[in-house]
Image (tube, rainbow, N blue to C red):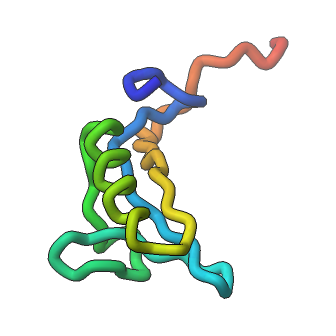
């Protein structure tokens, strides 16, 4: 699914996300560890690589760690027939 278009958007990469007990999210950055801003996180090109890193991080962390798709929207509208 990594190369499929999803409602006018394409998968740009993958972030590793950790959900804190208070409901906030943190994102993985190898240089800074966990950061609150997803823009400061490591963007992985390959889902398999992101999953491998997430698995390693999960071994020593009781919190839920997941891999999330980052979608790139090219700003163009899809050609959808509105019944006109």
Picture quadrant of residue 54? bottom left
Q: Is residue 82 above or below residue 70?
A: above
- Which residue occupies 58% across, 80% down? 20
Q: Seen from this angle, which residue lies furthest front? A: 59
- Measured as percent of width and height from the top left, residue 29 is found at 26, 71
Pick the residue in front: 22 or 39: 22
Q: Name the residue: 40% across, 28% down.
A: 2
| Residue at the (29%, 73%) spot, across then down | 40
* x then y, percent, for residue 49: 26, 43
* Residue at 48% across, 24% down: 5
Residue ranking furthest to the right: 83
Report the number of discs: 0
Residue 57: x and y in percent read 35, 65
User: Does residue 13 appear left or right of residue 66 in this picture?
Assistant: left
Q: Furthest-bottom residue in view? A: 22
Percent from the top left, x then y, of residue 44? Answer: 26, 49
If the image is split into quadrants, where does the C terminus sit?
top right
């Amino acid at each position: 699914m990594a190369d499929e278009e999803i409602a006018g958007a394409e998968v740009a990469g993958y972030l590793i996300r950790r959900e804190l007990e208070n409901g906030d999210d943190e994102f993985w950055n190898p240089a800074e560890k966990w950061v609150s801003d997803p823009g400061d996180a490591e963007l992985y090109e390959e889902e398999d690589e992101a999953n491998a890193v997430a698995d390693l991080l999960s071994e020593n962390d009781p919190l839920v760690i997941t891999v999330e798709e980052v979608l790139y929207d090219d700003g163009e509208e899809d050609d959808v027939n509105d019944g006109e």
